[in-house]
Image: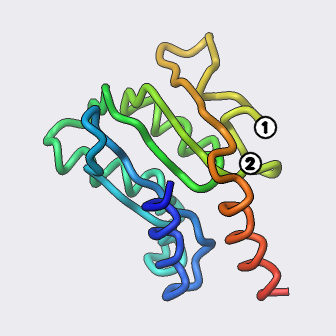
Amino acid sequence: MGDALDEAALCAATGDVPVGAVVVDAAGRIIGSGRNEREGAQDPTAHAEVLALRAAARATGDWHLTGCTLVVTLEPCPMCAGAILAARVPRVVFGAWDDKAGAAGSLYDILRDRRLPHRAEVYAGVREAECAAVLLDFFAARR
């Protein structure tokens, strides 16, 4: 989670909401990382999770990320949850809950939906206070 938080801190340069993500392989090595770049790239799909998944797929040469874990500072949204499942990521670890758009147990539970062909284990609240503080500080400075 420390590496994901480091990615989130890099969002300050573009003014993006500070969310960071990393994809870790079965040996614990980071094979992909990303941070929100919606503002910087003017791309509504440039969420931290999507960019980390893309980087991991490039690094491995395979979009099937079975055996990997996605670690992200904020609960994934529905779009990101869909991308995680499409990439066949079996585990997701996240820090802060997203009561407005979360899709890993708060608003929706897409990652564990038994109606879908793929599911992921979810480990929530890892360094939750620290991950939430980064977001709270960001939004407090904007208001």
Q: How crowded is mark 2: few (under 14 residues within 10 Å), some or many (20 or more)?
A: many
The residue furthest right is 143
Q: Residue at x 47, y 63 (%)?
A: 46
As helix, strand or loop, the secondary structure at mark 1 comes to loop
User: Image check: 137 left or right of 126?
Assistant: right
Distance (Cα) linking label 1 and label 2: 7 Å
Percent x, y of residue 90 = 43, 25
**From this viewpoint, which residue is outermost toward the left?**
61
Q: What residue type is labelled 2?
A: Trp
Q: What element carries label 2?
A: loop
Residue 67: image quadrant is top left
Q: Give the residue pinned by disc 2.
A: 97
Which of the 4 image quadrants contains residue 132?
A: bottom right
Location of residue 100 in the rendering, given as x and y in whole percent from the top left corner:
81, 51
Vertical comparison of 110 with 11: above or below: above
Q: Where is residue 83 in the image (x, y as percent from the top left)?
A: 46, 39
Above or below, 3 against 70 in this view is below
Q: Which mark is residue 82?
A: none
Write down the residue under mark 1: 106
Q: Quadrant of residue 24?
A: top left
